[in-house]
Amino acid sequence: MSRLDRHPGHCMLCDLDKDIRNIDLYIIGSEGFNCCHDCEMLIVKQITTIRSMISGAKREVMLRTSRERQEYQKQIKRLRESRDLTLEQGTS
């Protein structure tokens, strides 16, 4: 029997006797984490939510950086146009 096979045991998360599986989450010691299918799916949902939040935050930073870069380029363009206008007025 593989450690990935389900077998009767005690779920370390919900604290019930159910069919459990040892997964590679080394939270307590180095023996992995024994949990039932329902608790395993809760863990997967939490990890998915965290990854989604991180992805959203990265996307927001990229958009903000892009907007800031565009605004900076507009300011530089306005400054150059203003400088060129001042130079033209000075030579007239």
Image (cartoon, rainbow, N blue to C red):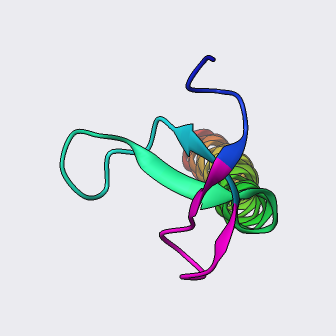
Left or right: 3 as drawn, with respect to 27: right
Name the foreground residue: 13 vs 6. Answer: 6
Location of residue 4 in the rendering, given as x and y in whole percent from the top left corner: 65, 27
Location of residue 9 in the rendering, given as x and y in whole percent from the top left corner: 57, 58
Residue placed at 54% from the left, 39% from the top?
A: 23
- For the record, the magenta segment spans 8-18
Q: Which image quarter holds the C terminus?
A: top right
Image height of 3 relative to 33, above or below? above
Name the foreground residue: 25 vs 55. Answer: 25
Q: Residue furthest left?
A: 29
Residue 1 appears in view: yes
Residue placed at 56% from the left, 47% from the top?
A: 83
Residue placed at 38% from the left, 42% from the top?
A: 32
Residue 65 appears in view: no
Q: Quadrant of residue 6?
A: top right
Location of residue 51 in the rendering, given as x and y in whole percent from the top left corner: 68, 52
In the image, is residue 11 part of the stretch drawn in magenta? yes
Left or right: 63 as drawn, with respect to 13: right
In the image, is residue 87 part of the stretch drawn in magenta? no
Q: Residue furthest bottom?
A: 15
Q: Quadrant of residue 46?
A: bottom right
Q: Quadrant of residue 78?
A: bottom right
Q: Which image quarter holds the N terminus?
A: top right
